Image (cartoon, grey):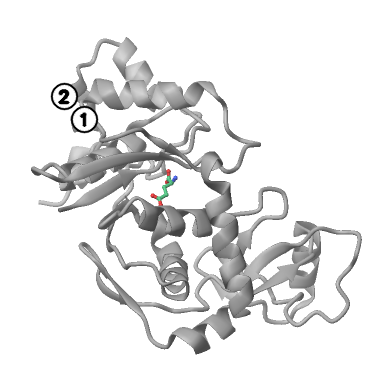
Amino acid sequence: MITTRFAPSPTGKLHLGHAYAAKVAYDLANKEESRFVVRFEDIDYTRVRPEFYQDILDDLAWLGLSWNGEPWKQQERLKHYEKALEQLKEMGVVYPCYCTRREVEEELTHLAQAPQGPEGPLYPGTCRGLKNPPRDREPAWRLDSKKAASLIGSLSFQDQIHGNIKVVPGLLGDVILARKDIGTSYHLAVVVDDAAQKITHVTRGEDLLPSTHIHRILQKLLGLPEPQYLHHELVTDQSGERLAKRNEAQAIASLRKKGLSAEEVKKMAHPDFYTPPHQSSP
Ligand code: GLU
């Protein structure tokens, strides 16, 4: 039995990129006894807008991408993420970090060779092994990627498009696993929920491929099952840019209003859609 999920953030309207992501997950689970579930990634309450929960579900239903069960909301599951964080604290694989974003940026400018990740410079480890933590600040919690690497040994994951990938524990450095303002993070919450919802196949955009290295480490540390992965291409616009939530023209609701059918919109929701014909491969 296959279980997949679509995990939108209710911070904007569903656009063609989301519709494609949802379709990939739906199609993979489109067999008897398989399940396709929806989970709202709404932990960052500063960016969530209440109207988008229903708007997203309305668009999914209109597209014919029907889901199983009640959609989950991560805001209702905070205690599960706290428990996982406690487990990691007990294992000594996370450490408190008191740096502000500005302090991290400052420190990076002073380093001759700042550690680099796929998306830019990485946290330089300022608070690792801190002897005298400041008393007047709440900390964030970061993964001690070196300590984690020493505990887990060699790990990999299987991706239906990219093949077998070896986990590089320091790829994203000592990432934040619990933000000081919200007590958790995308990485921690997604790993806990993929296990809780018994997701067998995690499908998502290839921009999140580096994050999967962190997720495999967390699964191993927390004793959670390993799902299969499928990181798909992203839908881009004419100039090759990712679709932005603020671009109304690519919102499913706008295309609906224009009179397009669900079938037409589903065809448009594809990475090749915007490629001009003379550039497409033969
Ligand atoms: N919320 C993420 C997105 O919309 C999906 C994260 C995931 O599937 O793990 O890209």
Q: Which quadrant holds residue 252? A: top left
CA gap, disc 1 and disc 2 = 5 Å
Nearer to the camera, 192 or 54: 192
> What residue type is disc 2 on?
Glu
Kindly identify the residue that appears in the image at 22 percent across and 46 percent down.
279
State yes or no: discs 1 and 2 in contact (Cβ < 8 Å): yes
Q: Is the residue 142 above or below the residue 184 in the image?
A: below
> What residue type is disc 1 on?
Lys
Q: Is the residue 37 above or below the residue 194 in the image?
A: above
**Residue on which the image places disc 1:** 266
280 relative to 257 in the view: left or right: left
41 relative to 266 in the view: left or right: right
Secondary element under disc 1, as helix, strand or loop, is helix
Residue 98 in the image, given as x and y percentages of width and height:
79, 65
**Residue on which the image places disc 2:** 263
Residue 73 in the image, given as x and y percentages of width and height:
47, 38
Q: Is the residue 230 above or below the residue 55 in the image?
A: below
Nearer to the camera, 207 or 71: 71
Residue 100 in the image, given as x and y percentages of width and height:
79, 59
Q: Which quadrant holds residue 228? A: bottom left
Kindly identify the residue that appears in the image at 18 percent across and 52 percent down.
2
Kindly identify the residue that appears in the image at 53 percent across and 40 percent down.
76
Other-residue count near label 1 (Cα within 10 Å), few / some / many at <14 / 14–19 / ≥20: some
Residue 236 in the image, given as x and y percentages of width and height:
35, 42
